Image: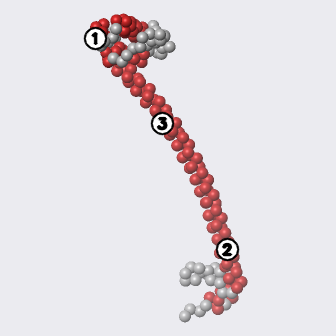
Amino acid sequence: MEPSRCSRGDEAKKRKLEDPNSEGSLVACDTVDLKALLDQHTDQMRRMQSQIDGLVAINSTLQARLDDQAESQAQEVNELREKSDVLELRCGSLERSIQVLRKDVNWTYSAPSIPRIHWIEQGREEEYADNMENNIGYIKAEARRIRNGENIDCTCLDFYGQMAVLHDDALLPHFQELADAIQLSNGIG
């Protein structure tokens, strides 16, 4: 059996707290040495706790910065999505304009004429047929003026005080011509 480090003499007592045992821990032989060892461990634990507290504070600061950056980026993403939506709408409008321009490089009013007899055969009166001929003429004239950049106030669909225009698929090509002209215009009143 190995003799106790405490029994090695005065020389050994001076080095008691400096010599590790077989496990690498410092050895204390009396209460003074034990107190010194505890004080040393307490100081070491305080330093470690101070380091931990410092790391926790740094971690909290970094987490706050990360949260701020994440919030800022989320806001930026939302703004970019809104801008993207606006640009997609604009792009869609421009694509439709290009399609119209390609289709109508040498534009002529292409909606077919609707003969007067069309209205009469539907059981409409002469007055209604007259009104429809006039309305189609207004639509055609407005579409031409808008295409030529002359029109600043489109009133061809203002039927105030006139006979009601009933739905008829034969009118759709005329409305499409007007819509195409308006879409290509710089804006009308």
Q: Amino acid at mark 2?
A: Thr
Residue 53 at x, y = what percent? 64, 62
Q: Nearer the viewer, residue 144 or 65?
A: 144
Residue under label 2? 42
Mark 3 to mark 1 CA distance (whole Å):
54 Å
Circles 2, 1 touching at the beta carbon (< 8 Å): no
In this rendering, is residue 87 above or below 38?
above
Tell me the element at label 3: helix
Mark 2 to mark 1 CA distance (whole Å):
108 Å
Quarter of the figure that contains the N terminus: bottom right
Q: Amino acid at mark 1?
A: Glu
Q: Quadrant of residue 150?
A: top left
Question: In the displayed structure, does residue 120 sit left or right of residue 93?
Answer: left
Residue under label 1? 121
Tell me the element at label 2: helix
Question: In the displayed structure, does residue 84 sit left or right of residue 120?
Answer: right
Circles 3, 1 touching at the beta carbon (< 8 Å): no
Which residue corresponds to the image point at 65% horizontal and 81% vertical from the top-left? Answer: 17
User: Upstream in the sequence, badge 2 or badge 1?
Assistant: 2
User: Upstream in the sequence, badge 2 or badge 3?
Assistant: 2
Q: Quadrant of residue 9?
A: bottom right
Residue under label 3? 81
Please indicate, yes or no, whether residue 26 appears anywhere in the rendered image: yes
